[in-house]
Image (cartoon, grey):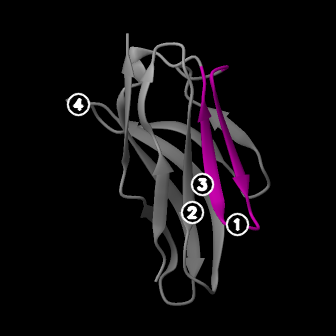
């Protein structure tokens, strides 16, 4: 059974930094794209950053130059380094991964979400 377990997040001041981590558990699976999404109160969930299995990245315009997504394939973990945080970055952040298993094929998995709050 595949699970995505997130850590990090919390409270930061504007201009500060936080780092999120997300590890994929389980065995006999292949991880393709990994990504971070976020959802602020009253808003739809939006893509923040995505990284392919080969390391190519893409970012939402609102976080370009401030956030960095990376992954450690040996640890099956994706990271999101968030610098120069703004109050509008406040949201629940969700890890997402496209994972191939013999029993479910290729499907998307989600983490439980972690709260990030940025105070002004």
Place of residue 82 in the rendered image (x, y in percent of width and height, measured from the top left): 58, 29
Of label 1 and label 3, which has the lower sequence position?
3
Name the residue beneath numbered marker 1.
Answer: 75
Residue visible at 70% across and 40% down in the picture: 57
Label 2, secondary structure: give it. Answer: strand
State the residue position of label 3: 34
Q: Which is nearer the N-term, disc 1 or disc 4?
A: 4
Q: CA distance from mark 1 to mark 3?
A: 13 Å
Label 2, label 4: how many angstroms apart (C-alpha)? Answer: 25 Å
Say the numbered circle drawn on residue 23.
Answer: 2
Q: Which x, y percent locates residue 72?
A: 74, 58
Residue under numbered circle 4: 41
Q: Is residue 34 left or right of residue 40?
A: right
Secondary structure that dominates the magenta span: strand
Residue 38, given in percent of the width and then of the height, sits at: 40, 38
Looking at the image, is mark 3 or mark 4 earlier in the sequence? 3
> Where 42 falls versus 107 (above or below)?
above
Q: Nearer the viewer, mark 2 or mark 3?
A: 2
The answer to the question of whether label 2 and label 1 lie on touching residues, with beta carbons closer than 8 A, is: yes
Q: Nearer the viewer, residue 23 or 13?
A: 13
**Residue stretch rendered in magenta on the structure:** 65-83
Dot 1 lies on which element?
loop
């Amino acid at each position: 059974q595949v699970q995505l377990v997130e850590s990090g997040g919390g409270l930061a001041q504007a201009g500060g930094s936080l780092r999120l981590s997300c590890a994929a558990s389980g065995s006999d699976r292949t991880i393709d794209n990994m990504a971070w999404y976020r959802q602020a109160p009253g808003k739809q969930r939006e893509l923040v950053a995505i990284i392919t299995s080969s390391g190519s990245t893409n970012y939402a315009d609102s976080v370009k130059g401030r956030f960095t997504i990376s992954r450690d394939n040996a640890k099956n973990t994706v990271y999101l380094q968030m610098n120069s945080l703004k109050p509008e970055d406040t949201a629940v952040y969700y890890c997402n991964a496209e994972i191939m298993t013999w029993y479910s094929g290729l499907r998307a998995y989600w983490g439980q979400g972690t709260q990030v709050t940025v105070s002004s």
